[in-house]
Image (cartoon, rainbow, N blue to C red):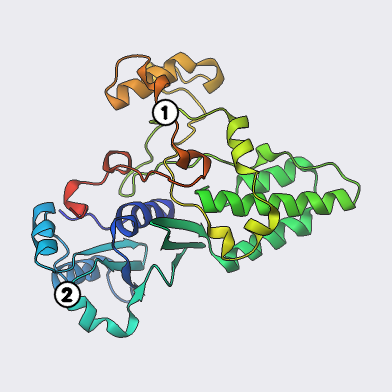
Amino acid sequence: MYRCVAITPEGFIQQLAVCYVGRGYWFYVTGEVPEHKDPADIDRKLIERYQVDLSRWARLRRKKAGLASIQYLRHGRFFVLVATHGHHLMFTTESSVLHDARRSPIRFAGYAISYRGGHPHVRIDHAAYLDFKAKLLDRATRAPIPELCAMFRCAPFEPYAPVRRQLIAVWRALNRARKLAGLGPLPIECIRLRRKIMRPFGECSSSSVLLPAHHELVLAAVSPEPDEVDAYPQAAEGGVEDVPVDSGTCNFAGCHGESAACQECQHAEVDRENGLAPGSASDLPVSAGMLGLEGEETLTEEQVDVPLDLVDA
């Protein structure tokens, strides 16, 4: 059965960016299901009309024949149809509303998803970024540091590489305002640098890769100058990176202790999930994508829980 309904906005964004846009599904059509219609009926109608529910091998044969493949994804009443290069009915019937993600980003839930420099980009949409920045600056000199830290930590954006840089631009602007007012700076630790790996069609997954120390992430993240990240679209530089979730507590063997006190349990949990020998996960190399640098690696199908029949060959 073709799975197309994302449980959360974060899962929708991850599935769209990593598994679709990142794999050549650049042409898209977006829409909203009317209030008086059943979304499940619209799902069946579009999947049947555009032959979306195909196996991996059928998509491979279509690609060799010069035909496009289609994917369909929906969250709530918002849906998107994405297509690869080739001939397809969608290019004719939806030509008036068809867009290219390399030129016009897909906007949803405050995010903007595009394809640039050979990989997908997930950033905060310009309007949402300006609203978030104005909200923080309005409280910069009036709120205590704990409240400002909480506002950063509760920001409704997963820290993809471009998003991290935008958040750091806001952090710099906030500290400049506090400095002029004679107040102390906000620590960089208030910015969440680790992204949760979501199961788009189910619950969140747990950690699968060990991350570098927090100070290493900070050194890599704060290096750009403010003008390089505060301006749009320069703030979008970066890409989708392979960053797992920081679970906060140890869930191995019913331990449920604090992460700092259960490193051995976490390592064993990581090794078990990856099918590795105990202790081998700690030797895994750190990808450049973890630090928001060039040459990021995209997530694998296993990490995002995507069946093979949903991935273009």
The mark closer to the camera, 2 or 1, is 1
Residue 104 in view of the camera: yes
At horizontal 40% and vertical 56% (from top left) the residue drawn is: 120
Q: Give the structural element (helix, strand or loop) at label 1.
A: loop
Q: In the displayed structure, does residue 270 sit left or right of residue 66? A: right
CB-based contact (under 8 Å), mark 2 and mark 1: no
- Residue at horizontal 15%, vertical 53%? 1
Q: Is residue 152 left or right of residue 52?
A: right
Q: Is residue 135 above or below residue 292?
A: below
For the residue pair 10 and 36, the one nearer the viewer reads as: 10
Instruction: Report helix, strand or loop for mark 2.
Output: loop
Using a 10 Å C-alpha cutoff, classify the residue at mark 2 as few (fewer than 14 neighbours), some (14 to 19) or many (20 or more): some
- Mark 1 belongs to which amino acid? Pro
Residue highlighted by disc 1: 285
Q: Residue at x 23, y 66 (%)?
A: 43
Q: Which of the two residues, 256 or 265, is positioned nearer the viewer here?
A: 265
Q: Position of residue 102 (x, y in %)?
A: 40, 68
Label 2 sits on residue: 88
